[in-house]
Image (spheres, rainbow, N blue to C red):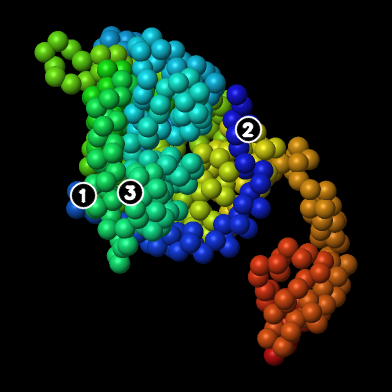
Amino acid sequence: MRAAEHSQAMHFQARAGEKVRNPVLQRALQKAKPLFVGKRAKGIAALAEDGLAFEPLRAACEEIRNRVLADLDVWLAIFEERAKATGAEVLWARDGDEICDLVIDVARRHGVTKAAKSKSMLSEEAHLNEALAAAGIRPVETDLGEYIVQLAGETPSHIIAPAVHKTIDEVEALFAQEHGRPPEPRTSADIPAMTREARQVLRQHFLTAEMGITGANFLIAESGTASLVTNEGNGRMVTTLPKVHVVITGIEKIVPTLEDFATLMRLLPRSATGQTISNYVSLLTGTKQPGEHDGPEKTVFILVDNGRAALLGSAYQDMLRCIRCGACMNHCPVYFSLGGHAYGWVYPGPMGSVLTPLYTGIENALDLPHASTGCNQCGSVCPVRIPLPKLMHRLREEQVERSLRPWSESFGLKAWAWLAGKPKLYRWVARLASRYLNWLADDSGRIRVFGLAPGWTAGRDLAAPKGKTFHELYAARKRA
């Protein structure tokens, strides 16, 4: 199964147009953005209370991730050895198909009929829920946001807040429908009551699921440990109650030591939710030992490539540093104009504009590297210093090199390059163009419809030039 088969990224423009015209979505997004941005700012500012500064800590986190990537095969071998020594089984998956096959095989070996899941983006890459259901195994998402989108038959629109695109009224109606009760009139958002309702439903799944499935924020090589960072506690229920625990995570999630993990945890929750530390940080090592009262009888790690190994040593290796905090999308003006579903695959926002073309094929996501204002808000907040605008620019260059851009765009750029090489002719054409654009404008100085490129004015009005070029205006100012 190639990831491209499930990607809708090639329809980005059409989906984006639909999302910006959705008033309910727009209200939900505009309510969420200041919360993300404001909480992160407070969390980063609070570093000073611990005698820390953001940039040096950021540099340390970048160094840790680069150190791992420089010898990834070595750290993976160490992790496999240490994890097996604790009683865990370590399996390897090349792609989404192999993830599904391995999980289903483990489930059948242990008589599993229901799997309780904590949030796992790699299971989204593999479309694991569909594969489990087809094999007669019921998957139940237990993260509240994931549970909401599962009930709605949707996919997550954000990597840490999967249901950020939903309003409280939409969730209330969904719960009433799926939980078999009449909808309650609500004069104000009663989030605690709805959370209790979800908790009551999910409790039975926690108690009856034979398998727990999670991702991992990091894998700690020296101890063979998976770390899980959550705010709801569902991760602990999924990893301690079922008899089988399956961890599905990418090969790039390795960190060498517990000290390295602690350093990264200084920035991960602050970048994601603005917290100094998440409510639950679990370090999961091996299986339940004699005398212990909880924990799985069987632990399985599935370490996944799915396009990651190909990035090592490439122009895009920096992307493997990503710790999935979501800060880039939380600060992206494009993401918060469209929401995550417009991007068409698992990862939205700036990170998705790079990862989706790399994992599904650049020819299947031509618009995503262009879904950026180039403002670098994403790069400036990334806790591991991923140069996201630079990587998007490199993807654009690759599109041109591989002749993947529309012929009209290529022709226009070549014509401009030819003209720019002839300064006198360029200035003459520029004078004509500035006067023509000024003539097109209405009395308010705006161009409502630009016939030569209608897309530019389909959703906006353009400010018209003054009818003179910069050179003309500058020369007149010098004379004055």
- Mark 3: which secondary structure? loop
Label located before the other in sequence (2 or 3):
2
Residue located 61% across and 57% down the image: 18
**How many other residues sit within 10 Å of disc 3, few (<14), some (14-19) or many (≥20)?**
few
Q: Is residue 368 left or right of residue 281?
A: right
Residue type highlighted by circle 1: Gly
Residue 248: image location, x then y, percent: 41, 24
**How many other residues sit within 10 Å of disc 1, few (<14), some (14-19) or many (≥20)?**
few
Residue 473: image location, x then y, percent: 72, 81
In depth, the one of 478 and 136 nearer the eye is 136
Residue topped by disc 3: 181
Seen as rendered, the residue at the extreme left is 291
Q: How far apart are marks 2 and 3 (CA)?
A: 39 Å
Tell me the mark number nearer the camera, choosing from 1 and 2. 2
- Indicate the quadrant containing the C terminus: top left, top right, bottom left or bottom right: bottom right
Residue topped by disc 2: 4
Residue 348: image location, x then y, percent: 51, 45
Residue located 19% across and 48% down the image: 50
- Mark 2: which secondary structure? helix
Residue 139 visible to the viewer: yes
Which of the numbered marks, if any, corresponds to residue 114? none
Whether pointer 1 and pointer 2 mark residues with C-beta atoms closer than 8 Å, the reply is: no
Residue topped by disc 1: 51
Label located before the other in sequence (1 or 3):
1
